[in-house]
Image (spheres, rainbow, N blue to C red):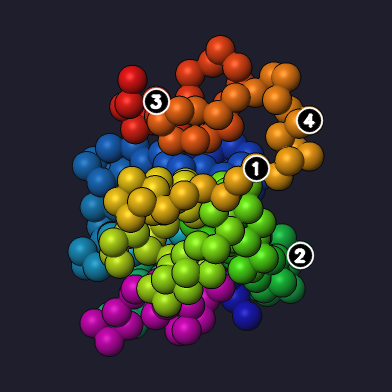
Amino acid sequence: MNHIHVKNLEKYHPGYRDRELKWAKIYFSLVDGDPDFELIENEVDKWRFIAILCLELRAQCPLPDSKAYWTRKGFDLRKRPMSATLKMLQPFVDVVTGEDEDVSQDRYTEKIREEKKREEKRVEGRPQSIDDVKQYFVELRMKDEAVSFYDHFESNGWRVSGRTPMKDWRATARNWVRRAVERFGKKLDPIPKAARQAVEHETEVCDRCEAVILKGQPCPDCMQRGVQ
C-alpha cells in the first residue's frame, strides 16, 4: 500500500514523530501568496491538504492511501476522487511505497493502538469492575450503596445526568454518599472497633458529616460543600 507524506514536515515540525503535538504550524503565506498553492484551482484540494497535514502530525507517520482510510477521516470521495486531489498536491506531498519501514502499515496501526491506550488511561470516568466500587464504598463507609451506584451508572454508560461522560467516578461516588446522608437520612457505616482504636489518637469524626478527619484539621468534605 502507498502512503502519503507531506513534504518538509520535519523541517517545520522537528521531532513530530516523537512528540504528541496539540497544534499544527501553518504559515499564512501558504494560503495567501504561495504561488504553487494558488495554482490549485479546486478548493476541495486546498482544504484536503490542510487536513492531510494535521492528520500526519496526529498519526506521527505518513498516511495510508486507501479509500477506507480517507472515508473514515471524513473525505467525501464522491465529491472528488482522492487520486485527483493527490495529483494536484504533487508539489506538497510525496507518495511513498508501503515497503518503507518508516511508513509501514504496522507502524500506523501501532500508533492508533497507542492512542487508544492513552485515551483509556485518561478516562477515569468508569471503574474497572464492580469490585473496585465495592471496595471504595467500604472506604466511604456506605458499602450497601455500592451495587446501586454501580448498576445506576453502568446502565446509562457512566454519564452525569445521563448526558455528560463522567470524568471521575470516585468523585461521583462521594457525591452519591453525601446525597444519601443529606437527602435520605442514611447513616454512615460505623468504624470497626479495631480500626477506631488504631487511629483514635490522631483522628476524630466530623460532627457535621461523620467523616473521619485528622484531629484539629478542617473536614475536606465539608469544605468542598461550603459548610463552615
Mark 1: amino acid:
Ile
Amino acid of disc 3: Met
Q: Residue at position x 58%, y 58% from top? A: 143
Q: Which residue is mark 1?
A: 191
Report how far apart the C-alphas of labels 4 and 2 lie in the structure. 61 Å
Indicate which disc residue 223 carries: 3
- The 10 Å Cα crowd at callout 2, few under 14, some 14 to 19, many 20 or more, is few
Which residue does the numbered mark 2 point to in the structure image? 101
Secondary structure found at label 1? loop
**In x, y percent, where is residue 172?**
43, 51
Amino acid identity at mark 4: Ala
| Badge nearest the viewer, 3 or 4 | 4
CB atoms at circles 3 and 4 under 8 Å apart? no
42, above or below 24, in the image = below
Q: Is residue 226 above or below residue 103?
A: above
Q: Position of residue 117 (x, y in %)?
A: 63, 60
